[in-house]
Each structure stands twice: as structure tokens, then as C-alpha cells.
Image (cartoon, rainbow, N blue to C red):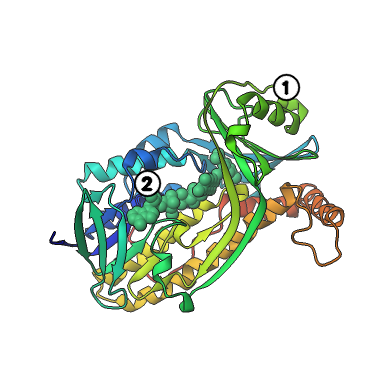
Amino acid sequence: MTTKRLNTQVAIIGSGPSGLLLGQLLAKQGIDNVIIERVSADYVLGRIRAGILEQGFVDLVRQAGAAHRMDQEGLVHDGVIIAHNNQQTRIDLRKLTGGKSVMCYGQVEITRDLMEARQAMALPTWYEAPVTNLAGITSDNPKVLFSHQGQDYELSCDYIAGCDGFHGISRQSIPAELRTEYERVYPFGWLGLLSDTPPVNHELIYCRSQRGFALASMRSHTRSRYYIDVPLDHKVEQWSDEAFWEELHRRLPEEAAERLVTGPSIEKSIAPLRSFVCEPLQYGRLFLVGDAGHIVPPTGAKGLNLAASDVAALYRLLNHAIRQNDPSCLQRYSAAALRRIWHGERFSWWMTNMLHNLDGVEGSAGEGADTYQKFMTSELDFYLNSEAGKTVLAEQYVGLPYEDCGVPDPA
Ligand code: FAS
Ligand code: PHB
């Protein structure tokens, strides 16, 4: 069968939040782009993931013209609570950061809004079309090879945005000898449950208890999202809804647990936790964006938000490179993106170590689990009882400023 040939300016692999947001922003500047996605749109929308958006992400979605429902239904949160052994401390984000806040709005909803915005502009998007190879990445005219309904296609382009997540093809297309990968795998996973029950609190509660970690989050005033940490060898099938609710009730601070409304789960899954960064994030005309280049444990609510700051950097540089015919600026992408990524990685690692009962995985030889846990509970106690400490927490939770890429923001 002959291969059908297509072309565009920017080929985007992956129809997750990274690919969809980048595609909208480029299209708004008149830059042609095609999104190629391995699975169906419904399958993408079936993934229950993040729930907290930094202001930078919210601003990008508005710039992309896809913010109508988010602005109507999103919940602005001015604070977040950290509970340690039944003691609750509110971090006043707005006061401690000079007026910043976060938006509580599910990743599924953002993805749906971006898909609808793309559809409204009739932009070319291929679903159930796995990319099988990238060719000519270091040439001026790279090619993305994919298949769809038994037909092979070759998409010629000027640039490739690898928005294909941790298990995608893009990162593997950078020669191994040119890649450095940094990784830390945590000895537990997060068991998450989604339920149509009213949230236990109007703001998020992150809990460290003797029994382990818990997080009380939400998607709306009538839909809650809860997490508890579980051993890595646990399977979601071994956790009944009742067992989950009972364990969550025992880990929440008593005052909140009394308000807990339980109900049937509409989704339940276990996510492994890892810190991961690939350096560099670019090779020839290929650029890694979001989970394709880095992963964080969700304890700092940074995964989706770091994907957004990658999109902001690549969008600005691609726009300048294409519209000013100055591709040299693109050499700045990896360094600009990585500086903010590493801040997000460190914050997520720090929050994970402070809020989970880790057994000395960070400790030096001979240092026992108890010693390490004593260090981390003391660290948590210090930060929750110091204005300077709470400010450090708040500034990072709302999101550090986006990096200046040395080109104007086309907003
Ligand atoms: P995504 O993984 O979302 O999207 C990549 C897309 O590329 C996928 O649709 C995939 O099908 C497609 N693809 C892969 N290979 C392809 C190929 N060869 N050809 C074509 N398409 C291909 N972040 C938070 O902030 N808070 C959380 O609570 C949180 N929970 C998470 C739970 C889980 C289980 C996971 C996996 C992640 C979680 N994250 C969380 C992080 C998550 O939200 C990511 O940061 C976010 O999905 C990143 O978006 P993308 O970079 O678009 O990658
Ligand atoms: C969520 O609502 O899914 C959520 C919120 C904050 C986190 C992680 C997950 O840190």
C-alpha cells in the first residue's frame, strides 16, 4: 500500500493538554499545525488526573480562546490546608503571595474545552493514529510517520512538538548517548477516588498522619477527588469503596473527617510516583513538552502546570522563529524550560518527603527510617509555624514566574 503524504508547519504528537494547548496557541497566530494522537478522543478524556491550575496556565487557556467554561465553573482557591497529626494549618496563598491564587478545575475539563476549541476551528487532528517513527529530525524538513485505519501516512513539517507523554516515542527519538535521564521512584503509589459527593472542605487539605498521606481535593461543589498513599504492590481491585472511605476517614483530621460524605466511586485508580527529567529537551527540530520530558509526584500539583510552562516557552519561540524567520532562537528552549522544571521537581520532591512516611530512602548509609522521619516531621513543623516558611510554600504552590525566553510574548 502506498504511503500518503501530508505537510504542515508544526507536527504535534499527542492530544493531551500539552499538545492541545500548543496547537490552539499556534493556530491563533496563523501557524499551521496537525495533532496526531494514538488513541481515541474519548480514551484521552477518560484519564482522571490533575485538578489544580496555576495562574500561568489559566492565562494561557484564556489566550488560547478556550477559557469560557473554566471561567464559569472553575473554583478559585485563595488558600490550602496542610494537616499534620490532626493539627490543621491554612496557607493563605493570596496574603502570602501578594494576591495570587490557584484554580481548581479538572484536567479532563481543560482537555475537553481545548478539544472543542480545536474542533470549532476545524484544525486537523488525527485520533487512533499511532506515530511509529520520526525521520530527518536534524534536517530542515523532518517527517512524522503514522498509521490510521490501516493506511500509512508521512507528515512533512518544519518542527515536531513531542507532546506524547512519558511513554511516547519522542524522547526515545533523541539518541541515548545524547540524553541524560534523572529519576527517583517512590516506594508507594496514590490510590485516587472520584465521587459525586460534596467536598469535605472548600479548600484542599493535604494530610500527613501516623497512618500515611491523604489529600482531600475536588472538581466542583458536588464532585470530590480523594487520594491516600498505598504500597506499590497494591492493586486497585483489592480496595473496595468502603475500605477506601474507612482509611481516608482515619487519616483526615478529625474535624474534617466528621464532615466526610461518602458515596459510590465513579473512578478509582492507583498512580505510581516518580521524579524524572530528561536533558536536553530538544534534538534538531524535535522539542519535548510536558510529560514527554519530565514527571513529578503529584504532591505539589505541578505535573500539568509544568507542561503548561513548557508550552508557553515553545509557543513563544516557535512563533518568533516562524514569523521573524529566526530559527536560531529555538536553541534557547531546553535551558529556559529546564530551569522552571527543576524548581517544580524540587518542590514536588520536598512536599512528597514532608508529607509521606518515607523510610529513609533519602537518608545516608546507617541513617534509619526513624531518623529520617524525625528530620522531615521537624521540617514540616518548622515551615507550618513560620511566616517565612509558609511564604516559601505559598510562592511555589501558586507557581513561580514563567522564564523569559528572550523573545516577545505574542499574547
Ligand atoms: P499526556 O500523557 O497527558 O498526553 C500525551 C498523549 O500522547 C496521550 O494522549 C497519548 O495517548 C499520546 N501518545 C503517546 N504516544 C503516542 C504516539 N506514539 N503517537 C501518538 N500519540 C501518542 N498532574 C498534576 O498536576 N496533578 C495530579 O494529580 C496528577 N495526577 C496524575 C495521575 C496519573 C495516573 C498520571 C499518568 C499523571 C498525573 N498527573 C498529575 C500529571 C498529568 O496531569 C500530566 O502532567 C499531564 O497529563 C501532562 O500532559 P501531556 O504532557 O499532554 O501528557
Ligand atoms: C487533584 O485534584 O487531582 C489534585 C490536586 C492537588 C494535587 C494532586 C492532585 O497536588
Q: Identify the image quadrant of the N terminus.
A: bottom left
Q: Residue at x 58, y 68 (%)?
A: 182
Q: Can residue 98 be seen in this view?
A: no
Label whose residue precedes the other's in the sequence (2 or 1):
2
**Ligand 1 under 8 Å from disc 2 Cβ:** no
Q: How crowded is mark 1: few (under 14 residues within 10 Å), some or many (20 or more)?
A: few
Res. 360 image quadrant: bottom right
Q: What amino acid does circle 2 point to? A: Arg
Q: Identify the image quadrant of the C terminus.
A: bottom left
Across and down, in percent, residue 374 comes to: 85, 53
Nearer to us in this view, 110 or 397: 110
Q: Give the answer, above or below, for where 284 lies relative to 293.
A: below
Across and down, in percent, residue 79 comes to: 63, 40
Nearer to us in this view, 9 or 279: 279
Q: Nearer the viewer, mark 2 or mark 1?
A: 1
State the residue position of label 1.
258
Q: Residue at x 23, y 60 (%)?
A: 31
Nearer to us in this view, 50 or 314: 50
Q: What amino acid does circle 1 point to? A: Glu
State the residue position of label 2.
62
**Ligand 2 under 8 Å from disc 1 Cβ:** no
- Mark 2–mark 1 distance (CA, rounded to whole Å): 38 Å
